[in-house]
């Protein structure tokens, strides 16, 4: 599909409807203790998680501990090329703003994935914690990026005026 949100929603619905039905029919025919259906269900859930990670992974900023972030900021401020570092960071942030999902899309995807996970939980394939972690990191990065962009605009607007009283 050309719309990534619709593609992921359809993939979650596929897990909830078709794959769940196939697993239920298999268990009805061959018994509930079979390892084949468990391995197959795990492979289907991993496929969905890979799709989600491939879509959102490039737009998630890796987390660093606060002490490392503070040390990195201090070194960047002391360096001669801090303007270059700042511009490179802003270009990276601009790329993050082009993410395929917004907050509403992430919330809708979470609801669909939660419903699918609840259905598959009956089969022993609860995957909501993995989806939650990915979507949480994505939304947090998205909001941080939007906040930094807003602060950049505010800063540039404030610098346009001479604040010395006349």
Image: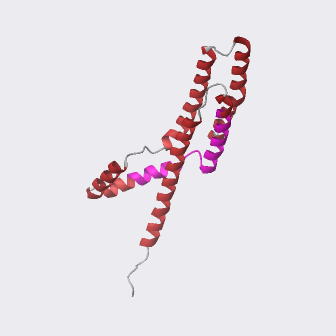
Magenta highlight on residue 109: yes
Q: Which secondary structure dominates the residues rendered in magenta?
A: helix
Q: Position of residue 137 (x, y in %)?
A: 50, 44
From this viewpoint, which residue is outermost toward the bottom? 166
Q: Which residues are magenta?
A: 88-117
In the displayed structure, would residue 65 be above or below residue 151?
A: above
In which quadrant of the rendered image does the C terminus lie? bottom left
Vertical placement of 83 versus 65: above or below?
A: below
Between residues 138 and 85, which one lies in front from this camera angle? 138
Residue depicted at x 72% and y 21%: 24
79 vs 118, nearest the viewer: 118
Residue 11, percent across and down? 65, 32
Task: Check residue 132 for magenta coloring.
Answer: no
For residue 81, say whether it is visible.
Answer: no
Q: Is residue 1 left or right of residue 158?
A: right
Q: Where, quadrant-wise, is the N terminus in this rendering?
A: top right
- Residue pictured at 47% horizontal, 67% vertical: 154
Q: Say whether residue 104 is visible.
A: yes
Quarter of the image where one finds residue 44: top right
- Vertical comparison of 3 with 88: above or below: above
> Residue 6: x, y in percent?
67, 39
Residue at left 29%, top 58%? 77
Residue 38 screen position, x and y as percent: 61, 19
- In this view, the residue in front, 105 or 133, is 133
Res 49 quadrant in image: top right
């Amino acid at each position: 599909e050309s719309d990534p949100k619709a593609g992921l929603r359809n993939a979650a619905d596929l897990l909830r409807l078709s794959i769940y039905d196939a697993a239920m029919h298999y268990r009805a025919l061959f018994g509930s203790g079979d390892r084949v259906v468990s391995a197959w269900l795990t492979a289907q859930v991993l496929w969905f998680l890979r799709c989600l990670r491939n879509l959102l992974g490039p737009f998630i900023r890796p987390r660093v501990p606060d002490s490392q972030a503070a040390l990195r900021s201090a070194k960047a401020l002391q360096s001669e090329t801090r303007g270059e570092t700042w511009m490179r960071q802003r270009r990276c942030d601009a790329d993050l703003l082009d993410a395929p999902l917004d907050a509403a899309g992430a919330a809708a995807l979470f609801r669909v994935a939660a419903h699918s996970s609840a259905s598959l939980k009956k089969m022993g394939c609860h995957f909501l914690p993995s989806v939650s972690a990915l979507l949480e990191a994505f939304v947090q990065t998205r909001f941080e990026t939007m906040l930094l962009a807003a602060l950049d605009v505010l800063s540039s607007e404030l610098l346009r005026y001479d604040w010395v009283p006349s």
